[in-house]
Image: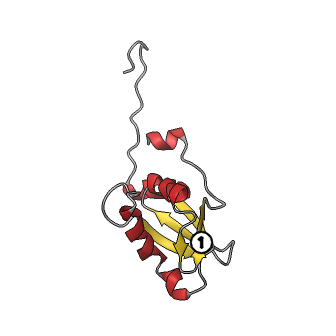
Amino acid sequence: TVPGVPGAVAATPKVLTSEEAKAMSLRARRVRVGNMPSDPELATGLKEFLNALLPALKLSVREGECVLSTAPDASAADGALVELRTVREAQNARQHLGGLKYGENTLTVDWPLDYAPLTDAEVRQ
């Protein structure tokens, strides 16, 4: 029941599974890394590099791999989409990794074209 509202019943919040939460937050957990080196070894090593760098810079929220995946960005030849474990880690990457040297290049970090922050309703779930 809802206090002060006769006959009203409070809604039970839906509990999301881990997979549902990951799917819902994907658009807010990815960053676009631009100006990637053309060296294929550096492109494939980006995930390992970032998984070592983010904790070293104290930008991860807990121990373990914070980069879940990397993929070429179809919208730009020199870019990669990086999926991070949490929204906070994506925000940290976006705010602090731009300007970093990787190979001979200086990386840019921004939100991908499909970025959208979580809504208040999504955060409450």
Residue at 51%, 53% in the rendered image: 91
Spot occupied by residue 15 in the image (x, y as percentages of width and height): 38, 45
Q: Dot 1: within a 10 Å radius of its alpha carbon, few (fewer than 14), some, or many (20 or more) residues?
A: some
Q: 41 above or below 23?
A: below
Residue at 53%, 68% in the rendered image: 100
Farthest-out residue, left = 63
Spot occupied by residue 113 in the image (x, y as percentages of width and height): 66, 60
Q: Please state which of residues 46 and 68 is positioned toward the viewer in this rendering.
A: 46
Can residue 26 be seen from the camera position used here? Answer: no
Which quarter of the picture shows residue 20? bottom left
Secondary structure under tag 1 reads strand
Residue at 50%, 59% in the rendered image: 93
Residue at 30%, 61% in the rendered image: 63
Q: 16 above or below 83?
A: above
Q: Please state which of residues 103 and 116 is positioned toward the viewer in this rendering.
A: 103
Amino acid type, residue under disc 1 in the picture: Thr
Residue hosting label 1: 106
Q: Please state which of residues 102 and 36 is positioned toward the viewer in this rendering.
A: 102
Which quarter of the picture shows residue 65? bottom left
Instruction: Say whether residue 74 is left or right of residue 2.
Output: right
Colouring of the image: secondary structure
Instruction: Say whether residue 70 is left or right of residue 57.
Output: right
Spot occupied by residue 118 in the image (x, y as percentages of width and height): 54, 47
* Quarter of the figure with the C terminus: top left
